[in-house]
Amino acid sequence: MSSENQDRFSRTAIGVFRLNGQFLSVAEELAKPSGLTAAWWQVLGAVLGEPLPVSGIARSMGITRQSVQRIADLLVARGLAEYVPNPAHRRAKLVRPTEEGRAAVSRIGPAHAEFAARLAEELGEEEFAQTVRVLERLSEALAAVDSGPAAPPPEG
């Protein structure tokens, strides 16, 4: 790896770590008025379209199954989600939002839309769209590199 590529990789990682913190902060502020945390919103958001097992939610979000399990248990305890039978797997129940959970997420919508509009105004529509494409491509590339064969250690 050239030192230039090593520097790019490090700067990308630091930038993504910083962005993660910024996104979590924004998400906490957006979710707070609806009685959710950013993590609760993230898990509920993952199952709005269809119920998923905890492992499926974890895979889609890129976090550990244990973290999702803890959050799912809290959401169920608070009546925001429920566990339902999984026809594909007897033991791995599906997580599904309750009406109360859907209502909590929907209350975030207006502030979410307003923040997205402000961000689009700051970046510009085309740069915003390009940012999405670049981040999605970066995620795909990391998955491909991470799942490939390990590189041999450098000689020395």
Image (cartoon, rainbow, N blue to C red):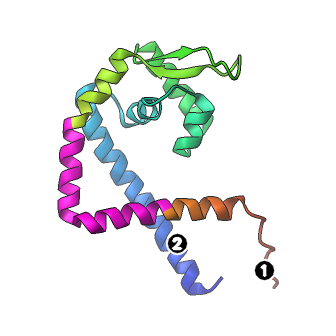
Mark 2 residue type: Ser
Q: Is the magenta stretch mostly helix, strand or loop?
A: helix
Of callouts 1 and 2, which one flags the residue occurring earlier in the amino acid sequence?
Answer: 2
The residue wearing badge 2 is 10
Residue drawn at x 22%, y 57% as measured from the top left: 119
* Badge 1: residue crowd in 10 Å (few <14, some 14–19, many ≥20): few
Residue drawn at x 41%, y 13% as measured from the top left: 79
Front position in the image: 36 or 87: 87
Q: Please give the label number shown on residue 154.
A: 1
Question: Does the segment drawn in magenta span residue 85?
Answer: no
Give the percent coordinates (x, y) of residue 116.
24, 50
Distance (Cα) linking label 1 and label 2:
19 Å
Residue 59 sits above or below residue 148 on the image:
above
Magenta range: 110-136
Mark 1 residue type: Pro
Kindly state the secondary structure of the residue where label 2 is placed.
Answer: helix
